Image (cartoon, rainbow, N blue to C red):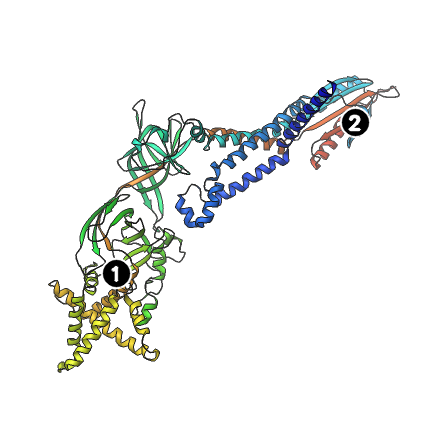
Amino acid sequence: MTTGSSTQGIQIRTRQRWLSEAVELFSSMRFAISLLTLIAIASVIGTVMKQNEPMPNYVNQFGPFWFEVFGKLGLYAVYSAWWFLLIMGFLVLSTSLCIARNAPKMLRDVKSWRDNVREQSLRNFHHKHEWHTAEAPAQAAARLVRQVGARGYKTRLADKEGGTLLAAKQGAANKWGYIFAHAAIVIICLGGLLDSDLPIRFQQWFYGKSAFTGNGIIAEIPERYRLGLNNPTFRGNTLIPEGSSSSTAIIPQKDGVMIQDLPFTIQLKRFIIDFYSTGMPKLFASEVVVRDHETGKETAATIKVNEPLIYQGVAIYQSSFEDGGSKLKLVGYPMRGGSNSHFALSGVVNGSTALPAGLGDYTIEWSGFRPFNVENMQASGGGGSTSGDARAVNVGKSVNRGLMDSLDKHLGSSAKNANSKDFKNVGPSVQYKLRDKTGQAREYFNYMQSLPIDGAYVFLAGMREQPDQPFRYLRIPADDNDSVAEWMRLRAALANPALREEAARRYARQAISNGREASPVLREQLQQSALRGLTIFAGDGKVSGYIAVTRFLEQLPAAEQEKAADIFMKILNGSMWELWQAARAQDGLEPVASDEAHGRYLQLAINALADAAFYPAPVFLQLSSFEEIKASVLQVTRSPGKKVVYLGCLFLVLGVFAMLYIRERRLWIWIKPAADGQGSQALLAMSTQRRTLDFDKEFEQMKARVSGDAAPPPSA
């Protein structure tokens, strides 16, 4: 029995010791500093790495391997990651335990006068002073109380054995600084947790809510994917086209989205946007009408950046703007085959359109439209036209280095060039994806109007295969009517074997000079050379343009390649001219004048035909007209934790101010009758938490004050 009780007692003491050590660890300074360090590191990561971006952006930026690693660590949404919330929770626990352990002792110390001190203890103080006064102890005590109180000290007299003790204190509120500062950490963390994803996760854990991963109309999304009006905190976005309204917000989640129902409906009456000359937005604002669901009351307001609308505790911020479904009309030109037809096409931004039958099983996904693009038109650079096999080296890279670098990043990048001086609006543009039946897609970006590049007007047609790549641009020269019609006619003619043969015959006939009769053999040889040049340039479906020309010339002996290249390009240029005229004649058009301007156009057209091999699209789409519809992106938030954080910040300011600027000082004066029975003997001692020069000066002043004003000894 005794042994069992002893063992049980040991187990109880062991558990108590373990609990005591755990509390000591969690409430220790080193544990709190470690947690704060981890929070600081996480905050740095959250600042450097963009948060809550679409997942494909992270895949393109980091690659598949690191995307998975960072995703497992929750770095794409650091502030809502489970480990970050856990650290915040432990910090609240640690700081709360620290307050619970130390605050009562601090408060008792604030109230305490520490009047149980002994005379001998005062003699051990560093700041002490002893003097004799002719006053009786009671008179001396009364005078000292007045003098010390005049210096801002609270005083108290205590009768001691053999004397009287004057205890005084000042700056006891310094202790409240520590309490306020520690409480501020707890309050701020609680406010942060309240405004985090924790309330939404709580609903997912206990109320069956989950993220929606499919597509559909918002009003038809089931209840399990929606958050109710009583949701205490949320931060979501709503996109509203002009003239439309919304009563829900979209809250991004790691594996989908959740729908937050709002207690009101926001209708966008008008979206206002103004730009700098560089093309960067200067002002954007939304004129809205908010209709309350309960009362039906309508409130008109204008929401600007940094000027939100606060309605029923919900803040509505102007976040950004998007296209709201602009209606586009385009003209499509086939880029394959010998047909020179064109067709009309319509589309809506953020919608999709099937490509007409006969052009392939493709779907056009309209992803963007800009009514104007401000670009730097004074950028310098090469990219001029060349000919011969030297042109083949640069095939697919026909770029004006200054302007094209800007166009590659067409969304206002010209503002970043410190040497830019000539900003011009180059007109509307359309952006879309062509997706084939296997799901593969390429992205295209076409300008509506022709642009002056290298002294000639060209239509720019951009293409990229991955979202993180810059656009590469095909430059289609503008004809006499500022259109792509002549180039498309020439492209179709080059793909037509019959027209190539006709162009070769015309070239052979025109090449015989001075009107003399040439032998049929010479004419036939010239015709075959022209036909071969056109056929090689047209390609075999795999290789075309200058690349095909280069490969053909490489089959010749090295010593003959340069001369052969010169002859080949002369024949090609001449036969391409005849091909152009033959195509126009087939369409019932007059021949174009043989002058320098049309010769320059033909050279640019040939270069563009060579580059077309690097523009893998079945069709070229040119914007012909549009009806712009703007959309405003509003951020809708309910953040009750914000007021809690403000309260915590107030506590933090008060705490830091109290700790830094309020100095606690303690003063004791021991008064007792003099040993000779004449007057009194007084002993002064002072202490402070931090010994400074100011305190040394204060002690000297206090010493002079209490001992210098002593009454003179009574006359005999």
Residue 22's disc number:
none
Check the picture and name the quadrant holding the C terminus: top right
Viewer-side residue, 199 vs 603: 199
| Residue displayed at 85% across by 21% down | 674
Residue 476's disc number:
1
Q: Callout 2, which amino acid?
A: Leu
Q: Which residue is under mark 2?
A: 122
**Quadrant of the image occupied by residue 548:** bottom left
Left or right? Give the position of 200 relative to 424: right
Residue 666 seen by the camera: yes
Q: Position of residue 325 (x, y in %)?
A: 27, 42
Asked if marks 1 and 2 touch (Cβ < 8 Å), the reply is no
Q: Position of residue 480 (x, y in %)?
A: 19, 62
Q: Position of residue 206 (x, y in %)?
A: 44, 27
Q: Is residue 526 depicted above or below 489 in this figure?
A: below
Viewer-side residue, 398 vs 85: 85
Q: Is residue 450 depicted above or below 35 in this figure?
A: below
| Residue displayed at 27% across by 44% down | 349
Q: Callout 1, which amino acid?
A: Ile
Check the picture and name the quadrant holding the N terminus: top right
Q: Farthest residue in the left direction?
A: 588
Q: Position of residue 38 (x, y in %)?
A: 56, 39
Viewer-side residue, 674 vs 651: 651
